[in-house]
Amino acid sequence: MTSIYTEVKALPTQGKRALYIPELATVNPEKFGVFISSIDERSLGLGDYQEKFSIQSIAKVLSLCLAYSLVGEKIWDRVGVEPSGTAFNSLLQLEADNGIPRNPFINAGAMVVADVLVSELDRPKEEFLEMVRKISNNPTLNYSSTIAQSEKEVGYRNIALCHFLKSLNNIDNTPDEVLDFYFDLCSIEMTCEELTNLMLFLANNGKSVQNEHQVISVTQSKRINALMQTCGFYDESGEFAFRVGLPGKSGVGGGIIAIYPNKYAVSVWSPMLNEKGNSHKGMEFLERLTTQTQLSIF
Ligand code: GLN
C-alpha cells in the first residue's frame, strides 16, 4: 500500500475543489491521506490520514442507516433504489418521477431521508451526532458550523431541490428545517482514520467493531452496501464499480470510503475532484489498491 500511495501522490494534481462551497475552495489541494482497517482492526494509515476534512455526502450513508433503522422498509415508499445516471444535485428527474428521488445518495434523496429524521427524532442534530459517536466510540466527532454556514449562504440549488420536493409532497416538515439539518449533516468533519473506523460496521454486517453495537440489521447492511455499489458515485457509479470493484461513497470534500464486506474498510482523502465531483486521486488510489492486491469483491 505504501508504494501505491507514493505513486499516486506523485501524479500531477488534476481537477478542481468543490468551488461552489466557499469554505471547501480554500483547502490545500495537495492533501492526501489514506487509512485502511480490517474488521479485526489491523490497520495502516499513510500521509495526511490524521487531518480532519469535511465528509460531505459520505454522511448520507449514516443518515440513511439511522432512518432505515427507525422506519424500516417504509423508507423505500419515499425514495428509490436505482442509479440516477445524473449529477448529485440534479433537478431533472424529480418532476417526471413525481417527487420520488431515484436513490438516497443524490441530494434530493438525502433530503427526503433528512425529512424522515426530522419527523422521527425530537432533537435530530444531537441524536444523529450521538449515533455517529456511539458507533465508533469517538465522542470528538462533530459538525463544522463554518462549513455548514458557508454552504447555507450559497446553497441555491439545494434550496430549490428541497422546495421542489415539498411541492411534490415528499417533504413533511418545512424546507428550512430539513435544509438546516441537511447542511449540518454534510458538514461533519473527521480524519481518514476516524472515517474508516466509523464505517467499519458496514464491513461487519451492520455491527460496530469497536463496541458490538448492532447499528443496522444484517439485511439492512447488505442493502446499504448494494446501494453504495450502484449509486454511491452518482453518474460515475458504474465507473467506480468497474475500476475499483467495491461498494463506496464519495463526498465533495474529496473523501471516499470503500467497503469490502466481511473484510475491511478503506478511506482516502484528496480534495481535487473530477468532473463528476469525485476525488481524482482517491479513485486512482483505490483502483490501484484493489487491482494490485486483488482485494475487490469481483
Ligand atoms: N453538501 C453537498 C451538497 O449538498 C454534498 C454533495 C456531495 O458531497 N456530493 O451539494
Image (tube, rainbow, N blue to C red):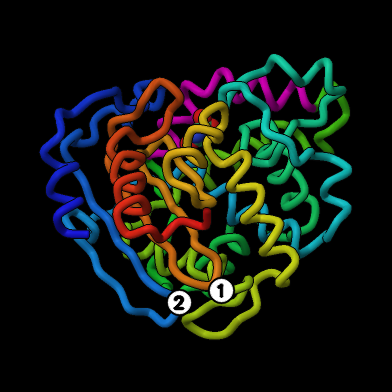
Report the residue marked by disc 2: 39
The magenta segment is 147-165
Outermost residue to the bottom: 211
Quick one: label 2 or label 1, which is nearer the N terminus? 2
Dot 2: element: loop
**Which amino acid lies under the numbered mark 1 shown in the image of this protein?**
Asn
User: Magenta includes 111?
Assistant: no
Q: Nearer the viewer, residue 204 or 137?
A: 204
User: Callout 2: few (<14), some (14-19), or many (20+) C-alpha neighbours within 10 Å?
Assistant: many
Q: Is residue 20 left or right of residue 87?
A: left
**Image quarter for residue 40?**
bottom left
Q: How far from the left and from the top, in percent, is residue 73?
A: 86, 56
State whether residue 41 is above or below residue 162.
below
Q: Looking at the image, can residue 177 be seen?
A: no
Vertical side of 144 occupied by 111: above or below: above
Q: Main secondary structure of the magenta part?
A: helix
